[in-house]
Image: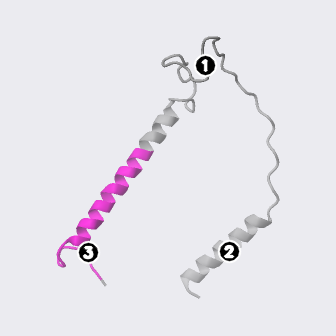
Amino acid sequence: MSARAAVGGLVAAAALLVALLPPAAAQEPGTTTTVPVAEDQGIVPQPNSGVPPAEPGDRGGALQLGLLGLLVLVIVAAVLLLVRQSRRARAPDGAGPARR
């Protein structure tokens, strides 16, 4: 049995197992927070009228900024890898990677 067939069998078994599991129980309703809205403020808040982030997951918090940095890093790495591969593919035969 080849490795590809073994991996395919494992994926099919995992998909069947997930399909046969009962659905998860509903979550208990949590507490909600309401943000006070001034009378003169419309749906779109004015610039600099909000509150600073109190938790890392709030708007503009550390988690959002970290996620932005991670996304930028992944995109830059993908572009650099693409450029490297295209240069190797266009290089003369002796300078590129080993070909089969």
The secondary structure that most of the magenta stretch takes on is helix
CA gap, disc 1 and disc 2: 52 Å
Location of residue 51 in the rendering, given as x and y in whole percent from the top left corner: 55, 18
Location of residue 27 in the rendering, given as x and y in whole percent from the top left corner: 79, 42
The residue under label 1 is which amino acid type? Answer: Gly
Instruction: Residue under label 1, please give it.
Output: 42
Residue furthest toward the bottom?
A: 1
Q: Which mark is residue 12?
A: 2
Between 31 and 42, the one nearer to me in the picture: 42
| Labelled pair 3, 1 in contact (Cβ < 8 Å) | no
- Colouring convention used in this rendered image of the protein: one colour
Quadrant in the picture for residue 4 = bottom right
Q: Which of pointers 1 and 2 lies earlier in the amino acid sequence?
A: 2
Instruction: Residue under label 3, please give it.
Output: 97
Mark in the foreground, 1 or 2: 1
Mark in the foreground, 3 or 1: 1
Residue at point 65%, 11% (across, down) = 39
Determine the secondary structure under disc 3.
Answer: loop
Determine the secondary structure under disc 2.
Answer: helix
Q: Is residue 73 left or right of residue 57?
A: left
Q: Which of pointers 2 and 3 lies earlier in the amino acid sequence?
A: 2
The residue under label 3 is which amino acid type? Answer: Pro
